[in-house]
Amino acid sequence: MYFSDYMNEWLYGSEGYYKDFKAIGKAGDFYTAVSTSAFFGASIANYFYTLIQEGKADRNGWLIEVGAHQGYLLCDMIQWLYTCDPTLVTTLKFGIVERQPEVQKRQLEYIKERFGDDIRITHFNDISEVEVDYAFVAANEIFDAFPCELLKDEKVAFVENDEIIWKEASPDMLLWAGKHLLKQGEIAVGYEDFAKSMSKGIQKCDFVSFDYGEKYVRNDFSIRVYRSHETFPLFDEELVLSESFKKDDITYDVNFGHVSEAFTANGFQEILYETQARALVRFGLIDILEQFAKQTSQENYLREADRIKTLISPTIMGDKFKMLHFSQ
């Protein structure tokens, strides 16, 4: 089978890696910005609030997260919006795009734990199910979880008996690769359909997404497996596919140029593309921390400040992760 089909089965198939709820953080296979600090979500919510104040976003619309894991990000955003304007939690509607029933269940449990019955969540199995007038859509690390093809020397990867073999690539794939000057690396599958579905179902949309990668073709393989915070390149001789299949996370660096191309082709305008550090500071992260300092102990402030350093430090998450804001 094509590697993209193998990867899709690995992550989302029967007993796939994301089929059930996965721990993130120290107990899991990797960290995310969401698991690092609640101020990550607060900063994105603060940006959304700014758009509402400027009349660019609808206070009666939807706030939706795609790929919400346990629901930390959405809850952190709701909490900050309530701090900014308590009436927003009554005028806005809240949703999560999540296809796995077990994960949906865990999300609802966590949201009830945070807000009781005050916040109601609508689950969508796919972005194509979202049909609303306005939505602010937020996502963290979703594009690296789209299946991808692997191209090398005009050949594409197949998997047979848990072994990667190479066969001649199709003319269409080679045409795409030639257009993007790609000779070796990953070609994400599904960005175009995702953007098309969002454009079709949401009449007016602001989409803000964070992920790791660059806005150009690297011409090298970045695809890798994460297991208990250890990283194994896919082509590492020590990695046995049959042992990692469906048990470990598999990911790759995002080509943001491809993401942008997919969204602009479907009627979106690219508003911002910048490092996570610049974006979070622009969104008001430092101001939020200063407000927090006035309300808490020195010990709590220093602990949170240390977490925020992880988010914006150039050598950790700050420069490696990027933010894209599309508007329609």
Image (cartoon, rainbow, N blue to C red):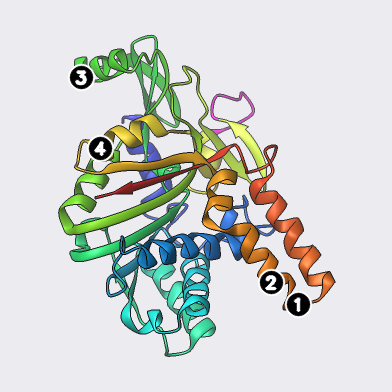
Q: Mark 1: give few (<14), some (14-19) or many (20+) Cα within 10 Å.
A: few
Amino acid carrying mark 1 in the image: Thr
What is the span of residues highlighted in magenta in the rendered image? 234-240
Residue located beneath label 2 in the image: 292
Estimate how packed mark 2 is, as few (under 14), some (14 to 19) or many (20 or more) residues with alpha carbons within 10 Å.
some
Instruction: Name the residue: 54% across, 29% down.
Output: 234
The residue indicated by pointer 4 is: 264
Residue 270 vs residue 129: left or right? Answer: right
Which of the pair 143/78 is nearer the observer?
78
Callouts 3 and 1 close, C-beta under 8 Å? no
Residue 37 visible from this viewpoint: no
* Residue lying furthest front: 54
> Reading the chain from its start, which is encountered first: label 4 or label 1?
4
* C-alpha gap between disc 4 and disc 1: 44 Å
Determine the CA span between mark 3 and mark 1. 58 Å
Which numbered disc flags the more N-terminal residue, 2 or 3? 3
CA gap between label 2 and label 1 equals 6 Å
Between residue 46 and residue 216, name the one nearer to us: 46
Residue holding disc 3 = 172
Q: Nearer the viewer, mark 2 or mark 3?
A: 2
Q: Are marks 2 and 3 in contact (CB under 8 Å)?
A: no
Image: 166 above or below 22? above
Q: Are marks 2 and 1 in contact (CB under 8 Å)?
A: yes
* Dots 4, 1 in contact, CB < 8 A: no
Residue kind at label 2, given as amino acid type = Phe
Q: CA distance from mark 3 to mark 4?
A: 21 Å
Q: Is residue 201 left or right of residue 84?
A: left
Residue at 52 percent across and 28 percent down: it is 222
Residue picked out by circle 1: 296
